[in-house]
Amino acid sequence: MAGEGFVCRLDALTPPERARHAALTEELRARARWIQEIPYGYAFRFPDDPAFSRRLVEWVALERRCCPFLEFEILLGEEGEPVILRLTGAEGVKTFLAEELALERVGP
């Protein structure tokens, strides 16, 4: 996989889970209001939507099984505040994420 020293465990997900993960990944890309580089990774801002937040947690649960080297942080503020997802890890994870998620900056 992309990124030096990082290998996704594709066998960690069943075929239906891989399909669900791919669909959720596309939804995350489409719903991101901004993507910001942070030390050792990226932060993503999403609109406040309880149903989407549940899918985001589902995505994290799947992603951490196939990419156990990633660190995840979900920030849920007051109602109406954006949802923030931070993906970080060891040195090199930022490059890995940019390649794997085909990231383009959406905001600041």
Image: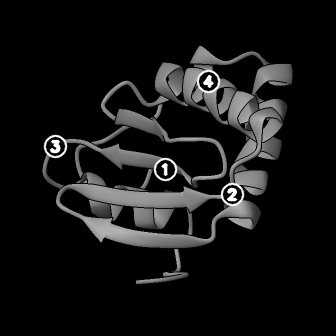
Looking at marks 3 and 1 on the same chain, the residue that comes earlier in the sequence is marked by 1
Q: Residue furthest left?
A: 91
Q: Position of residue 13 (x, y in %)?
A: 67, 18
Q: Callout 2: helix, strand or loop?
A: loop
Closer to us: 13 or 30: 30
Question: Can you identify the residue that label 2 sits on?
Answer: 47
Closer to us: 39 or 67: 39
Q: CA distance from mark 1 to mark 4?
A: 18 Å
Question: Can you identify the residue that label 1 sits on?
Answer: 84
Q: Callout 1: helix, strand or loop?
A: strand
Mark nearer the viewer, 3 or 2:
2
Q: CA distance from mark 3 to mark 4?
A: 20 Å
Q: Which quarter of the figure is the C terminus placed in?
A: bottom left
**Label placed on residue 70:** none
Q: Is residue 15 left or right of residue 89?
A: right
Q: CA distance from mark 3 to mark 1?
A: 20 Å
Question: Can you identify the residue that label 4 sits on?
Answer: 62
Residue 2: quadrant of the picture: bottom left
Q: Callout 3: helix, strand or loop?
A: loop
Looking at marks 1 and 4 on the same chain, the residue that comes earlier in the sequence is marked by 4
Q: Residue at x 20, y 55 (%)?
A: 40
Mark nearer the viewer, 3 or 1:
1
For label 4, the crowd category at 10 Å Cα-Cα, with few meaning under 14, some 14 to 19 and many 20 or more, is some
Looking at marks 4 and 2 on the same chain, the residue that comes earlier in the sequence is marked by 2
Q: Is residue 26 left or right of residue 85?
A: right
For label 3, the crowd category at 10 Å Cα-Cα, with few meaning under 14, some 14 to 19 and many 20 or more, is few
Looking at marks 3 and 4 on the same chain, the residue that comes earlier in the sequence is marked by 4
Q: Residue at x 36, y 60 (%)?
A: 42
Q: Callout 4: helix, strand or loop?
A: helix
**Label placed on residue 90:** 3
